[in-house]
Image: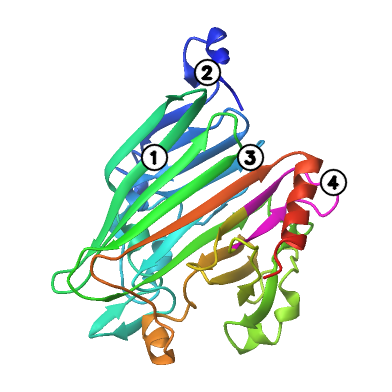
Amino acid sequence: MFNKKIMDYIGDISQIGGIKKYMFTSGKAKGVEAFDINNGNGLIYTVVVDRGLDIYHLSFKGIPISFISKTGIVSPYFYNDRGYEWLRNFTAGFLTTCGLNQVGEPCTYNNNDFGLHGYYSNLPADEVSVLSDWLDDEYVMKISGKIRQAKVQFENLLLKRSITTKLGVNSITIEDEIINEGDKREPFMILYHMNFGYPFLNPDCEIIIPTKRITGWDEFSDKNTHRYLELTEPDANMPELTYYHDLYCDENGLTGYMMTNKKISPDIGISVKYDKGVLDNLTQWKYLRKKDYVMALEPCNNLVKGVDYENKNGTLKYIDPGESIKIKLDIKFLETAGDIEAEKMYFKNNMIF
């Protein structure tokens, strides 16, 4: 971590890190606003204003971690909410947030047609603010904004998001607050679609998931739950596999997962931690196809079969008028053998509840 003493060596913080704002000017991304955040120690990522303050490119120590789909950045102007058309706007990136009252398969519920994974990731943020300054002896970089999902005579849901990184500190903290500003109880579904791609994701990648129980999304996945840690070479005929994990947690109710880019002598690692009391399911999606080589680990409060399925299954969660639900994701990036091993021991020894 850097302290204020470094300012004796430089004239402007942008020499080593900071936040840069810009706008895409061509193609389907034209007009989309974004921020690049650089922590000055090898962690660089892009927050996209017009896509719910989700995270696009992310790299650590020069190694790309996020999966970028063939669509690239697409403006929400092109969003089509029918069926599976969401996939034409699925940039992926490091984080695509799904929700807020629909996650998973297209369906019809309460006389409304819902497309794949809901509206959230195609909603622009409003009242976006930027903090990039010294607070005491730490240089803090924080992007905040509000994302509203509303429909006349139906839901009025507001998500307040902040994404924070400190100069020289290899971590990202995402804090969301979801508020029902309507006058009736609404379905509440949210999924953090965290997407890993090459070269971080590769056949030698190590995955640590403190799973208590694993089931398949469909019959084929359920018959292949033993393959959940398997990462193959890209294959044009590789089937899609999706699993649900019921995770162990630590004594404070925290759970999560960890990955490294190599099983032996890894260069980097990443861990994600969150409160299991709010996000009680982890969905794992593997699509190890040629040109689409991706695995997603998705903390969520639901299955991924749609709001109608959850309702009929008796598992649909709700948010009451005026209710506020807070979610925090702590994402840590690891570079030394000692730090990586210590994090492994945390997941192996502390996740026992």
Disc 2 marks which amino acid? Gln
Using a 10 Å C-alpha cutoff, classify the residue at mark 1 as few (fewer than 14 neighbours), some (14 to 19) or many (20 or more): many
Using a 10 Å C-alpha cutoff, classify the residue at mark 3 as few (fewer than 14 neighbours), some (14 to 19) or many (20 or more): many
Q: Earlier in the sequence, mark 3 or mark 1?
A: 3
Q: Residue at x 50, y 46 (%)?
A: 173
Identify the residue under disc 1. Answer: 143
Q: Earlier in the sequence, mark 1 or mark 2?
A: 2
Q: How many marks?
A: 4
> Does the magenta run of residues contain 150?
no
Disc 1 marks which amino acid? Ile
Say what secondary structure mark 4 lies in: loop
Marks 3/2: CA distance? 18 Å
Q: Earlier in the sequence, mark 3 or mark 4?
A: 3
**Which segment is the magenta one?**
254-271
Q: Earlier in the sequence, mark 1 or mark 4?
A: 1
Q: Residue at x 74, y 65 (%)?
A: 231
Q: Is residue 154 left or right of residue 213?
A: left
Residue 144: image quadrant is: top left
> What is the number of the mark on residue 15?
2
Q: Earlier in the sequence, mark 3 or mark 2?
A: 2
Residue 7 point in image, percent of width and height = 52, 12
Say what secondary structure mark 2 lies in: helix
> Does the magenta run of residues contain 258?
yes
Which residue of the protein is positioned furthest toward the right in this rendering?
Answer: 264
Using a 10 Å C-alpha cutoff, classify the residue at mark 4 as few (fewer than 14 neighbours), some (14 to 19) or many (20 or more): few
Identify the residue under disc 4. Answer: 265
